[in-house]
Image (tube, helix red, strand yellow):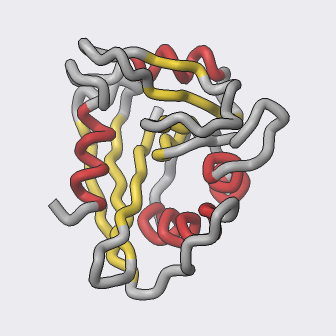
Amino acid sequence: MRIGAVDVGYPDAGGAVAALVLAEDPSFGVLAGERVVRLTDVAPYRPGAFFERELPCLRAVLAGVDLDLLIVDGYVQLDPDGRPGLGVHAAEAFGIPVVGVAKTAFRSATHAVPVLRGDSARPLLVTATGFPVDDAAAMVRGMAGEHRIPDALRRVDQLSRGR
């Protein structure tokens, strides 16, 4: 199984930095690769249409990469009725299952499965499409790292911030 975790950062100078970390197993215990793509032109942020800004960045960093599962920073669906979030749009664009891992609660995302990791009392909020959400939550719980944020998600965040 080839799994990728992606994140996008938006530097103050403009544009975007899209990052990807790859693993061959769901624990991300050993990273199989990293990739960073800088984009000069990005769509402006529009509330409720975050995917319009983020999806082109994901397309750029995933170009030519073959994956079985994608992990995004954020929600797959925005509410229990299935209102599409970034993850749904990514699943449609790339034709693969997507797991969303959000760090902050979104008021309408009452369906997200809370996952506690490390000593943190603040859960990560997991959603999924094309993959059972309980399995997705177990996968996030079992990812390498002792802290609230799994090591692979911390790494892809650092890469997207230019670190």
At horizontal 55% and vertical 28% (from top left) the residue drawn is: 126
User: Which percent across, then down, holds residue 116?
Assistant: 40, 15
* On screen, residue 121 above or below 151: above
Q: Residue furthest left?
A: 163
Q: Is residue 113 left or right of residue 21?
A: right
At horizontal 25% and vertical 39% (from top left) the residue drawn is: 31
Q: How many marks?
A: 0
At horizontal 68% and vertical 26% (from top left) the residue drawn is: 110
* On screen, residue 139 above or below 33: above
User: Which percent across, then down, holds residue 48?
Assistant: 69, 60
Q: Is residue 42 left or right of residue 7?
A: right
Q: Residue furthest right?
A: 81
Q: Quadrant of residue 155?
A: top left
Q: Quadrant of residue 32?
A: top left
Q: Nearer the viewer, residue 69 or 120?
A: 120
At horizontal 30% and vertical 49% (from top left) the residue drawn is: 156
Q: Nearer the viewer, residue 28 or 18?
A: 18
Quadrant where the image shows the C terminus: bottom left
User: Which percent across, then down, holds residue 19?
Assistant: 34, 59
User: Which percent across, then down, holds residue 95?
Assistant: 68, 50
* On screen, residue 101 above or below 137: below
Q: Residue furthest front?
A: 107
Q: Is residue 33 left or right of residue 52?
A: left
Q: Quadrant of residue 46?
A: bottom right
